[in-house]
Amino acid sequence: MTFVRRSLVAAAAAAALLAPFAAFAQDIKPRLIRFGYGLNEQSNQGRAVKFFAEQVEKASGGKMRVRAIGAAALGPDVQMQQALIGGAQEMMVGSTATLVGITKEMALWDTPFLFNNAKEADTILDGPIGQKVMDKLPEKGLVGLVYWENGFRNLTNSKRPVNKLEDLDGIKLRVMQNNVYLDSFKTLGANAVPLPFSELFSALETKTVDGQENPYNTILSSKFFEVQKYLSVTNHVYSPWIVMVSKKWWDGLSKDEQKILLDAAKASRDFERKDTREEAAKALAELKGKGMQINELPASEAARMRDKLTKVNASIGASVGMDLWNETQAALAKLRGAK
Ligand code: KDG
């Protein structure tokens, strides 16, 4: 037998001998999950992703590892959404508002003053209506697991306190890349400028825009108080985040792996809402301590804002579908004890 043939036979024998160990090695290599998000690691969003990662590692015995990648290092929401659809990234959490370009029903959650409080938000989002909206995602290559709380949004700017609607006239106000937000703030007289969240701080710092609107938590964690003097409390819309996975990737997981992720997502939802609300309760005092000048819109002006902003409701209903719109309004009326 020639040397070459002898070598090939030996190599084949070695491969056959090592094959089970290679398979075993493959088995023990943890499944790595890239979980992207837009705020920084110290934010409520970052803390909740860390909590989720710990839950997954614990429940899978280390077989599934979540790599939390914050501060839009994997790109802004819209870029991460495309990465999930293409299967280049496994998970993300982001705004439902930036998803409207993919799933128009997500615009339901942009409705100004839709929810009066967190209890209403939790009940609708975690109930059949929230699930119905999430069920529109798989046909677009995404799977929604749970909703987290971004929170009630409030106005900040560097020019003047907003005590009446006319104070918004001419304010260059950054809004999310979403037509309802664009239309809403144009209706209020602001000069609405759509920008990704990742560009917001520098836009405020360079005065490219005068103001923005976000929950207290984000104003605090993103240090907007360093570049925004005035905070006007409006609570003009409740903003959810949504935790999503790539459908391409999700469909390749075992049922056990899917259950681990879904259970961890539900646990992270409860953690995130509690953590966010505790932080929000203290945030206003902290922002005042950072030098922000804070004012509440007088009730009469809040009523004018609600009246003007809810003019977009008809277009939202048409966009998301009147059945879904009417079902939501009926569910809220029932929650509020309508006779
Ligand atoms: O990635 C950041 C977004 O998830 C979120 O914070 C959206 O509220 C948002 C904003 O203003 O862009």
Image: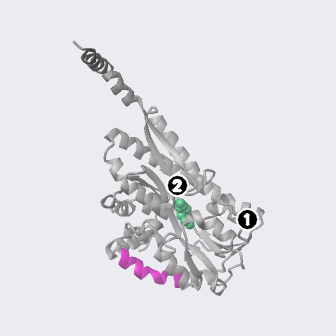
Residue occupying image coordinates x 61% and y 67%? 200
Under tag 1, what secondary structure?
Answer: helix
| Residue 316 in magenta stretch | yes
Residue 183 screen position, x and y as percent: 50, 81
Quadrant containing ligand 1: bottom right
Q: Nearer the viewer, residue 91 or 20?
A: 20
User: Would residue 219 appear left or right of 81 to someone viewing this image?
Assistant: right
Instruction: Confirm or reject: label 2 Cβ below 8 Å from ligand 1.
Output: yes
Residue occupying image coordinates x 49% and y 40%? 55
Query: What residue sits right under mark 1 in the picture?
Result: 226
Q: Is residue 223 visible?
A: yes
Classify 186 as above or below 153.
below
Residue 243 screen position, x and y as percent: 45, 54
* Residue type at numbered disc 2: Tyr
Q: Quadrant of residue 198?
A: bottom right
Residue occupying image coordinates x 35% and y 25%? 22
Q: Quadrant of residue 317?
A: bottom left
Instruction: Confirm or reject: label 1 Cβ below 8 Å from ligand 1.
Output: no
Q: Nearer the viewer, residue 91 or 135?
A: 91
Classify 22 as above or below 281.
above
* Residue type at numbered disc 1: Glu
Residue occupying image coordinates x 56% and y 65%? 197
Q: Which residues are magenta?
A: 306-319
Please, what is the dominant secondary structure of the magenta stretch?
Answer: helix
Query: What residue sits right under mark 2 in the picture?
Result: 37
Under tag 2, what secondary structure?
Answer: loop
Neighbour class for label 1 at 10 Å: few (<14), some, many (≥20)?
some
